[in-house]
Amino acid sequence: MGNRGRELLGLAAVVAAAVVATAGFAALGLPSPALFGGLLAGLVRALAFRGRAAVPGVAATAGQATIGVAMGSLIDLETLRAVAANWLPVLLVTLGTLALSLGAGLLLRLQRGISPVTGAFAMIAGGASGIIVMARGLGADARMVAVLQYLRVLLIVVLMPVVATVVHGSSGGGPADVVDDGPGWPAGLLFTVGCAVSGLVVGRLVRLPVAALLGPMVAAAAVDLSGLGRGAEVPALLGSAAFLVIGLQVGVSFTRESLRTIGRALPLALGVILGLILASAGLGLVLSAATGVSALDGYLATTPGGLYAVLATASDIGADVTFVLAVQVLRLFVMLLSAPLVARWLRRSAQG
């Protein structure tokens, strides 16, 4: 068997291990199990075996585009109406969250070995999977960003039900029918491929930063708002495959030195993340006072990450799901679209 054959066989083994890990993480109820599964399998491959491994460029681009379509399809007219009714306080709170994220990233720079761009991207609150996809292309350490982004998401997922019940006195049993199954997987596949290809082509033509992610995201949002998508979404299996590919791409790039750097940064990062969660809860109180929504709705709307867990919690406890989704999706778009500008500004500041 030639070198090419051995490489393909090794890659197939890593993918199979990632699928098994994904199933295990899904059974445990972890957020983004496919991304975690790919990350773990790639990490084991990078550290336990000799020789470098790499995810094929075509697969990585397809994964980024698919995730972009999934994010773009979150926006719809109902979401925009919910934002429009309280646009000024929602916008100010969103910008406040961005400022808090950048401040948290600056604090993270106190740890040796973390660049300004890596610190900022590790702490940007919203669209964790999208930020991880963008990190490498914008000069950040994708390994550090992936670990710290999902450390934040895990903390939020663990703390959110506790805060909702203990602090805000909520209880489960609310309406659960917040997810529309859409028109089915054939239409979803057509929607995904069409938005991914067109968004990628146009994004590269206009030289959009991280065109493989942002181009399809904007294309999917435009199709959704025009009504042409008729509620189509990325098929679940295809979305999981995309997350698995991105997880693998980050995982295989780990080295022992990078793990040591991340390990040294964890104590500081944990404190910074908890501070960010607390400060975001304060913004939730401000949003509640400014818009008249409940303190619980304000808290869920400003929780810095874990979008799908936030929506599941909001649905279970009978919160205003539309308002929570609107604020969370607006922040996701602002964070992802502003990330290239933030990276450019931080690089210039560091050079100056």
Image (spheres, rainbow, N blue to C red):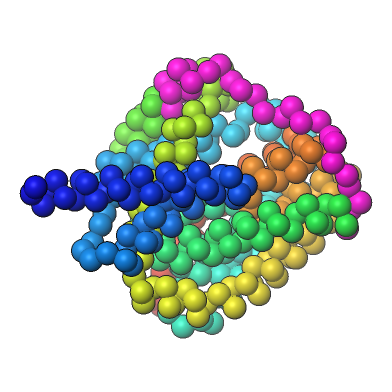
Q: Position of residue 221 (x, y in %)?
A: 53, 31
* Image side of residue 203 versus residue 147, left or right: left
Q: What residue is at 38 percent from the left and 61 percent from the top?
A: 43
Residue at the right extreme of this rendering: 169
Q: Is residue 40 above or below residue 89?
A: below
Q: What residue is at 84 percent from the left and 41 percent from the top?
A: 172
Q: Please state which of residues 11 and 202 is positioned toward the viewer in this rendering.
A: 11
Which secondary structure class fits the magenta region best?
A: loop
The answer to whether residue 188 is magenta is yes
Q: Position of residue 127 (x, y in %)?
A: 56, 49
Q: Is residue 187 in view from this perspective?
A: yes
Q: What residue is at 32 percent from the left and 60 percent from the top?
A: 45
Q: Which residues are magenta?
A: 167-192
Q: Please state which of residues 322 and 249 is positioned toward the viewer in this rendering.
A: 249
- For residue 80, what is the image quadrant? top right
Q: Is residue 211 in view from this perspective?
A: no
Q: Position of residue 219 (x, y in %)?
A: 46, 31
Q: Position of residue 269 (x, y in %)?
A: 58, 73
* Image side of residue 92 versus residue 200, left or right: right
The answer to whether residue 117 is magenta is no
Q: Please state which of residues 119 and 29 is positioned toward the viewer in this rendering.
A: 29
Q: What residue is at 61 percent from the left and 49 percent from the top?
A: 28
